[in-house]
Amino acid sequence: MKQYSEQMQLHADGGTRVMETGDQKEMNQKNAITQKSTTQENVVSFNTEDYSVFLSKAFTDLIDLAGEDAETFIELFYNRKQEYAEFQTIASNLYASGDNILVIGDAGIGKSNFIYRLFYEDDKLKENKLYPIMIDYRKIATDNKLTGMKLIFIEEMFKYFEDIDYALIPVGGGKIENIDDNLHHIQKGIANVAREKKKNKQPLVFIDDLDYAENDALFPILDFLAPYARTINVSILMCVRPPLYQVLCNNDSTYAILFAHTPRHINLRSMDLHSVLAMRLAPILTLNQNKKIIENIWERLTRVKSSQEKKYKNILKKLGVKNLDDLTEIVYPFTDSYINFMKKVTLEDLREMFTIATKSLVFILENYNNLTTIKEHEEVRKVISRQHIIDLFTPQDEYHLFNLHERINSKGNSLYFNVLEAIQLYESNLNPKFKISLKELGHAEEQIEEALTEMGYKRNRLLLQHNFNYAKDHLKKPVKYTITEKGIYYIQEISKWNEYKDKYKTSKNSIIEKYSYNETK
């Protein structure tokens, strides 16, 4: 464990070394042995019920965990020291500079957790004269998200004025019919507070999950935020994924200046998944070695020196581990190849990877003595085979593999599979040859558009949608799709698994096999 932890710390700072493919053949080349010993000393017995509460908490979204206990959130916060130090430096100057901030990172990479880390440090907020306002787009209860966002903003801004002892009374009690009047009232209040030199805190308005507004309310929301993004007396903080950032840059010059070019940028890199999973599992990895092991593991994983053994045991109890001495020892279970599979099929979305990790760990515990083992980084780890993957992640499960052959036409050709490989071959759907080749295989234009939309949805992300429906409808630009790393992985790896073919069938014809020669001539 010690050697692995040291390697893991190197990975956390410098990236991980993972196999390029999830092929089972590579697994078997790594000194695999089958552990089926029936001798008493080699049989490990796990009761997954003993771990169920821990597992449900261990892989919880940190924000949800923070709602229960801020201290636990801070202890489990991932190793983003460099980016967080940069973020703190920017935040410390917001009161004077009035800058806006843009945090850019892929889906599920931990952007929201990163922001909440600052918002949970009351001392830092007070020291930097910041008044935090959080608006989560996905959690707005009203059907009209824009109206809901405005109502939350109005309510929170009047709380801000009350907090700084500035008398500003909502018009009509802040109800829907008075939204425009109250927004105008707030803008005047912000200007008056600055002019009268009564501003002792800077409103920091955090807009989370704005990516989910892309096809309906995005641009009206940006219009609503624009006056506050322009003034130095309010700071707007947004988390966006790269596709939304490109939309902000390219669709309108006003939006580009206010929300893309002038804000301070923080780019979040992906994290080593081994490190993240080990961080979450650390409390139970080697529980029974000695009473100091919990503290020692946490020090190695988090680089936080502490002699507060009781503190870490309390955190374990909050995560659901009530009787530490009764739990059977667990070794870190996931192979490099399986980690690579999780990264590829989720595009490193931590929420999805945690869903996979939880089910995988339960499966390992339930089948511990029957699984093949291999030795990696001086650690014995358990092999989850292709067949196990097919059986574990069915359409009925929370996370499931995408069925590329769900829609097969009368000619025996698979719609999703052919569309995906055509995107890979022709680079995007805007290439004229894209639809020509698909129609030759019997796919109708309406079906092709349906497949593009389905594989571009956030829950699938086999394709990347480069501009949103607003651009198509209002700016007369066609919607462009390109293939993602996940899509390539499905074409080059998963679709070729015999186990996948047995489960989901195959396509009679392949676009790549049929037309790639002409493209490379």
Image: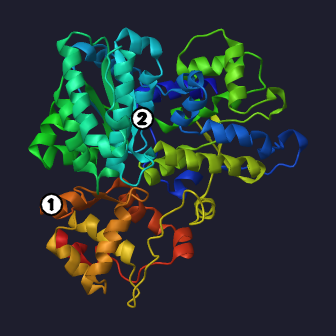
State the residue in front, 473 or 382. Answer: 473
Q: Secondary structure at mark 1?
A: helix
- Residue 411 visible in the shown view: yes
State the residue in front, 329 or 134. Answer: 134
Q: Residue at x 36, y 22 (%)?
A: 160
Q: Which residue is mark 1?
A: 474
Q: Residue at x 55, y 26 (%)?
A: 73
When the figure is inspected, residue 470 is found, relative to residue 154, above or below; the finding is: below
Q: Residue at x 23, y 23 (%)?
A: 190
- Image quarter of the N terminus: top right
- Image quarter of the C terminus: bottom left
Question: Residue 81: which quarter of the image?
Answer: top left
Cα–Cα span, label 2 and label 1:
31 Å
- Residue 104 visible in the shown view: no
Q: What crowding class fits label 1: few (fewer than 14 Cα within 10 Å), some (14-19), or many (20 or more)? A: few
Q: Secondary structure at mark 2?
A: helix
Q: Residue at x 25, y 67 (%)?
A: 425
User: Looking at the picture, which amino acid does disc 2 mark?
Assistant: Ser
**Coordinates of residue 118 in the picture (x, y in percent):** 42, 22
Q: Which residue is mark 2?
A: 112
Residue 267 in the figure: left or right of residue 307: left
User: Looking at the picture, which amino acid does disc 1 mark?
Assistant: His
When the figure is inspected, residue 101 is found, relative to residue 346, above or below; the finding is: above
**Coordinates of residue 496 in the picture (x, y in percent):** 46, 68
